[in-house]
Image: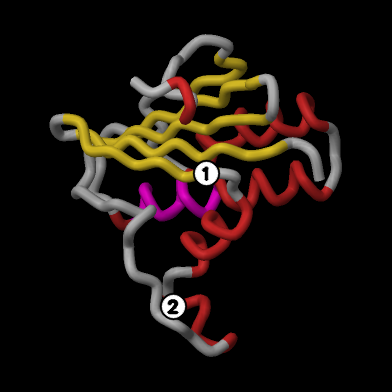
């Protein structure tokens, strides 16, 4: 696994296995806030991760979802793993939409692409693995 994208699972500061509903996300949210404090960067990281998690829960048909938060020298990495339908959010085509149409889908991916330092996806066996890397400097 490539160190440049943070695949190593060392320095994990929060992990949730078998996350099955949106309430499972609370621990990650609290960990981001306690690590970075209440600021705009924390809010953006939480929003992006909540959107990705919500998409997995609502659309992937997964019955196993896990996520982990890792602190690195230059930021935070969030790992999402699920056994749902194959879906590569890094290369998925986003269609231009008017503001009024944004709630019909695609907003979470757009937010993730705009607010991450890096997004890396791979399919490993029957698992989707997505890593979101965030700079912690605003």
Quadrant holding the C terminus: top right
From this view, report whether residue 137 is shown above or below residue 9: below
Q: Nearer the viewer, residue 26 or 83?
A: 83
Could you say which is closer to the camera, residue 67 or residue 119?
A: 119
Residue at disc 1, secondary structure: strand
Q: Position of residue 52 (x, y in %)?
A: 47, 50
The residue that label 1 is drawn on is 118
Q: Residue furthest top?
A: 10
Q: Main secondary structure of the magenta part?
A: helix
Position of the N terminus by quadrant: top left
Q: Is the residue 67 above or below the residue 99 in the image?
A: above
Within the magenta stretch, is there residue 138? no
Residue at horizontal 26 percent and vertical 52 percent from the top: 87
- Disc assigned to residue 104: 2
Q: Which residues are magenta?
A: 50-58
Tell me, for residue 25, which label it has, or none. none
């Amino acid at each position: 696994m490539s160190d440049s994208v943070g695949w190593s699972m060392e320095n994990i500061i929060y992990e949730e296995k078998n996350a099955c509903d949106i309430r499972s996300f609370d621990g990650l949210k609290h960990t981001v806030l306690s690590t970075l404090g209440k600021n705009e960067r924390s809010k953006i990281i939480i929003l992006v991760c909540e959107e990705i998690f919500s998409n997995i829960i609502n659309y992937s048909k997964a019955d196993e979802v896990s996520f982990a938060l890792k602190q690195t020298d230059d930021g935070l990495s969030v790992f999402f793993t699920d056994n749902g339908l194959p879906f590569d959010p890094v290369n998925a085509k986003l269609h231009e939409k008017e503001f009024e149409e944004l709630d019909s889908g695609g907003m979470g991916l757009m937010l993730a692409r705009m607010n991450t330092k890096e997004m890396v996806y791979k399919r490993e066996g029957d698992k989707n693995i997505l890593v979101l890397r965030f700079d912690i400097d605003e």
